[in-house]
Amino acid sequence: MADVSIGENVRAHYKSGTYIGEVREDRGDRYLIEVLAVEKHPMQGDLHNPNQVEDVFFHERKALAPHEKMNVKKPAVKPYAGEIPSYGQSLKQAVNVYKEKLVADGSAYSQKALQTMSGLEEIYERTYY
């Protein structure tokens, strides 16, 4: 576990996405982090039954919004020293990387996730791109 300070830029894994943000508070076993960019888009579908589409509720998972706060366990937080891209650019890149991975897979799960991502991408285009 990396020890980081308030005000420091970090990379944090939260739920199934990865974000770049700024530490706002130390809350004991967690940090409160303000989202500045998206590094990895959250996975679509049921996280408890990954890669399944039958007999599960297929969740649509949006990326956290810019300046949204997340309460992240300390082991999932690492220092980040690189240049922070704009939120819109980072989100678009994370979506494209995720979609490429889904297209390459070609499974029933990937097809359903691509449908979900198409809807999310319409929202993202109106709001962030």
Image (cartoon, helix red, strand yellow):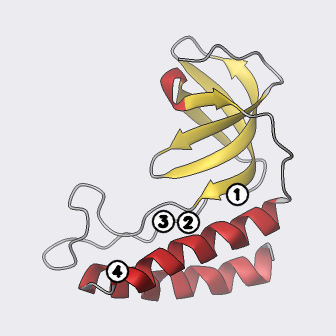
Question: Residue 78 appears at what percent x and percent y?
Answer: 62, 29
Q: Which mark is residue 62?
A: 2
Q: Which mark is residue 105?
A: 4
Q: Which residue is mark 3?
A: 61
Question: Residue 92 appears at what percent x and percent y?
Answer: 71, 73
- The first of marks 3 and 4 along the sequence is 3
Report crowding for label 2: few under 14, some 14 to 19, many 20 or more residues within 10 A (C-alpha). some
Q: Are marks 3 and 4 in contact (CB under 8 Å)?
A: no
Q: Indicate the amino acid at tag 3.
A: Arg
Report crowding for label 1: few under 14, some 14 to 19, many 20 or more residues within 10 A (C-alpha). some
- The first of marks 2 and 4 along the sequence is 2
- The mark total stands at 4
Q: Is residue 111 left or right of residue 51?
A: right
Give the quadrant of residue 91.
Answer: bottom right
Residue beneath the point at 35% across and 88% down: 111
Q: Which residue is mark 1?
A: 65
Q: Nearer the viewer, residue 80 or 5?
A: 80
Residue 80 seen by the camera: yes
Question: Residue 18 appears at what percent x and percent y?
Answer: 57, 49
Q: Nearer the viewer, residue 69 or 13?
A: 13
Up-down relation of residue 116 to residue 86 (above or below)? below
Q: Are marks 1 and 2 in contact (CB under 8 Å)?
A: yes
Mark 1 or 4, closer to the camera: 4
Q: Is residue 88 left or right of residue 115?
A: right
Instruction: Give me the C-alpha separation between circle 3 and circle 2.
Output: 4 Å
Is disc 4 placed on a helix, strand or loop? helix
Give the quadrant of residue 122.
Answer: bottom right
Instruction: Give me the C-alpha separation between circle 3 and circle 4.
Output: 19 Å
